[in-house]
Amino acid sequence: MSILAALAATAALGFLLGRVSVRPTIHTLLAEIVALNEWAATLGALLRTAEYAAGHDRLTGLPNRTSAAKLFTVRALLGHPTVVALIDLDRFKHTNDTYGHHVGDDLLRAIAERLSLAAKEHGGAAARLGGDEFAVLLHDADLEPAKPIAEILNALAEPTTLLTHDGEVTIHPTASVGIAIFDGSYGDFDTVLGQADIALYHAKRQRGSYRIYRPHMRMPHNAGRHGPRRRDHHPADRDEQLGGEVTP
């Protein structure tokens, strides 16, 4: 064998041996890359889940107060007028006390679904603020918020059949609504929501109605959102059932 042939054979053998020795390392690296991709996908899914949970109500799936505030803030920054409707179910406590909290939860889910659909039909969005309180944000395009709110109230009042431990029960829910209008230039979400709360206090004097906030409206100091709300304990409660009309 010539010297050149011997060198070529040696080089070829070295190359083959190198490939054989490197192959396990390559397989290890590929396995690590696959594992990293799977970990990244899992982390991404967890982050999306956490983000969704932070912005949505666990019971109903509706956006929560934080998401409603963000939506309002975006519209405010763009200078878009917005109607904020604060919706409070009338006599909801009776459902929980009579049929159990699981039935009350089912009613809240049914109301949430109706609110979401009704709000979308008017180009708006619905949110659950907590308890039996919801909010709807609508575009103030025609400056006539009463019409869509009346339609939303009618949608909520549709009979709802729920399953209790003793069988089915049909509830005719009603709600009262306080409306505040943001003109696109002055006010933040808390301010406008506070105005809607004052209007809701006045709406509660006639169950199933709505009121639009006016500057002259007042609410007792101890009836605000950070304490016992006098509008939730209106004298009319003593003479009414506390859960909407119920049909066994």
Image: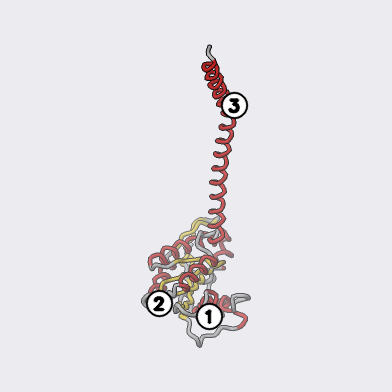
Residue reaching furthest top? 1
Which of the 4 quarters of the picture holds residue 59?
bottom right
Identified at 53% across, 54% down, the residue is 48
Judged by depth in the image, the label closer to the viewer, 3 or 1, is: 3
Q: Secondary structure at mark 1?
A: helix
Residue at the image position 44 percent from the left and 79 percent from the top: 183
Q: Is residue 141 left or right of residue 217?
A: left
**x, y (%) of residue 1?**
53, 11
Residue 244 percent coordinates (x, y)? 49, 69
Q: Residue at x 55, y 46 (%)?
A: 40
Residue lying furthest front in this view? Answer: 3
How packed is label 1: few (under 14 Cα within 10 Å), some, or many (20 or more)?
many
Q: Position of residue 26 (x, y in %)?
A: 56, 32
- Label placed on residue 21: 3
| Amino acid type of the residue tagged 1 in the rendering | Ile
Q: Secondary structure at mark 3?
A: helix
Give, as a three-letter code, the residue at label 3. Answer: Ser
Q: Which residue is mark 1?
A: 198
